């Protein structure tokens, strides 16, 4: 029984750790896109771990509601990231000056430099 | 106008409505007569209302059992990759001098159906160092955190898994 | 032990929301503020669920479920009106 409790506490605290990493990344990283790297990945996994830990604790019919909330968070978080990134890109988003642009469409990896924003609208 | 006269794909219509009905009983687990009737009316009405968007011509809505098994295997592999990605991001964020060199990369995908393309774009967002900014037909605009991860998204092994789920073989 | 660490995690979620307020208030652009609000949304959902389990009142799971959907729709609306200038 002690092992079970330790396992659930491990899940809970690792979930809080990943949420903490996401928040620190949101504060420390320099521009919008890199901030979204931290929040999209770490928030999703942290919320998932805490939801899995609670799924062990609650009773039978409530597990499905938690499962649905987890599925929605895991599918909605990347979608929100996608929408924010695309809208910022359309408004000539505020990226770092040393950002590189590579076009790999129909080309081997090193590719050519991307010509500009008309690549997105095509 | 969203109400169309006839339904093009009756089999897909019944499949989608029964999936919604299953989730209805997961959400409200009581088997009174009122609950059953209201759920049936709601599921059929919602599926009928959205049928112009759900059932496009030439793309019938079918799910084979083999595809469900492959999707489950894919999701397990994805969960492992998500944990690896989070440790990667945590190492970058918590290190004192932020070793990042961000950039955009435009890649092409082999997938054909819209559903698998969306799944692929979402998986790219959840795995190491890359987020999808735009998805337009078969071109993906990806933002990468470092140059190595940009190289990694160009040849990524999970895309072959999705291709296998889509057509039943690898080419 | 589980009850105790659930309470501690509730406190941690509240503190993380206060840390997120830095980006929401002093964020250079509107998109940064939206990203911060999104992180706070996740924290609030988890707090609602943990409180529902501590109070043994599972009706609040439905509240959390509706909160996920409404936060999603709100973010989409704000980003559309920022990017295109209109909502359609």
Image (cartoon, coloured by chain):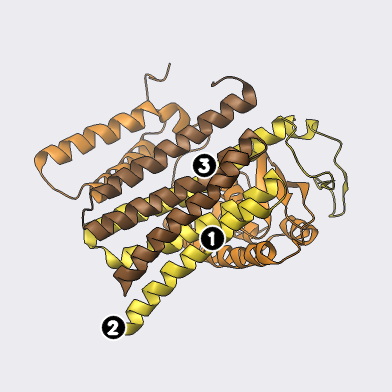
Chain colours: A yellow, B orange, C brown
Residue A103 appears in which quarter of the rendering? Answer: top right
Q: Are marks 3 and 1 in contact (CB under 8 Å)?
A: no
Q: Measuring 61% from the left and 48% from the top, which residue is drawn there? A: B121
Q: To which chain does the residue with label 3 belong? A: C
Q: Which residue is mark 3?
A: C37
Q: Which residue is mark 1?
A: A20
Q: Is residue B99 left or right of residue B69?
A: right
Q: Are marks 2 and 3 in contact (CB under 8 Å)?
A: no
Residue B115's place in the image compared with A91, above or below, is below
Q: Is residue B114 left or right of residue A55?
A: right
Q: Secondary structure at mark 2?
A: loop
Q: Measuring 77% from the left and 47% from the top, which residue is drawn there? A: B105
Residue B15 is situated, as x and y percent measured from the top left of the image, at 35, 43
Count residues near mark 2 (Cα–Cα under 10 Å), then give few for <14, some for 14-19, many for 20+.
few
Q: To which chain does the residue with label 2 belong? A: A
Q: Calculate the distance from the C-alpha at mark 2 to the C-alpha at mark 3.
A: 39 Å
Q: Nearer the viewer, mark 1 or mark 2?
A: 1
Q: Secondary structure at mark 1?
A: helix
Q: Which residue is mark 2?
A: A1
Count residues near mark 3 (Cα–Cα under 10 Å), then give few for <14, some for 14-19, many for 20+.
some
Residue A10's place in the image compared with B114, above or below, is below
Q: Secondary structure at mark 3?
A: helix
Question: Residues at marks 2 and 3, common chain?
Answer: no
Residue C13's place in the image compared with A11, above or below, is above
Residue B3 is situated, as x and y percent measured from the top left of the image, at 38, 19
């Amino acid at each position: 029984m002690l092992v079970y409790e330790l396992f659930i506490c491990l899940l809970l605290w690792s979930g809080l750790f990943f949420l903490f990493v996401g928040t620190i990344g949101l504060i420390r990283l320099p521009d919008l896109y890199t901030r979204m790297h931290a929040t999209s990945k770490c928030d999703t996994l942290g919320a998932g771990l805490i939801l899995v830990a609670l799924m062990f604790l609650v009773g039978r019919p409530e597990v499905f509601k938690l499962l649905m909330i987890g599925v929605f968070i895991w599918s909605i978080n990347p979608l929100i990231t996608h929408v924010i990134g695309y809208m910022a890109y359309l408004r000539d988003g505020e990226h770092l000056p040393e950002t590189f642009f590579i076009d790999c469409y129909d080309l081997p990896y090193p590719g050519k430099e991307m010509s500009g924003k008309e690549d997105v609208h095509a | 106008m969203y109400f169309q006269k006839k339904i093009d794909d009756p089999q897909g219509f019944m499949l989608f409505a029964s999936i919604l009905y299953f989730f209805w009983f997961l959400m409200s687990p009581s088997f009174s007569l009122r609950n059953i009737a209201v759920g049936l009316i709601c599921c059929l009405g919602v599926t009928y209302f959205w049928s112009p968007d759900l059932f496009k011509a030439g793309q019938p809505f079918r799910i084979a059992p083999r595809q469900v098994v492959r999707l489950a295997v894919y999701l397990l592999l994805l969960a492992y990759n998500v944990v690896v990605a989070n440790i990667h991001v945590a190492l970058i964020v918590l290190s004192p001098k932020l070793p990042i060199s961000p950039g955009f990369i435009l890649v092409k995908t082999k997938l054909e159906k819209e559903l698998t393309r969306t799944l692929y774009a979402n998986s790219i967002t959840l795995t190491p160092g890359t987020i999808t900014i735009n998805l337009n037909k078969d071109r993906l605009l990806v933002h990468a955190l470092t140059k190595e991860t940009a190289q990694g998204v160009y040849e990524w092994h999970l895309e072959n898994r999705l291709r296998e789920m889509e057509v039943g073989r690898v080419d | 032990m589980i009850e105790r660490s659930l309470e501690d995690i509730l406190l941690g979620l509240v503190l993380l929301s206060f840390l997120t307020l830095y980006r929401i208030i002093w964020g250079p652009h509107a998109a940064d503020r939206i990203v911060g609000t999104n992180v706070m949304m996740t924290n609030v959902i988890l707090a609602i669920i943990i409180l529902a389990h501590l109070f043994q009142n599972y009706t609040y799971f439905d509240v959390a479920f509706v909160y996920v959907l409404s936060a999603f729709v709100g973010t989409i609306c704000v980003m559309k009106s920022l990017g295109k200038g209109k909502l359609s």
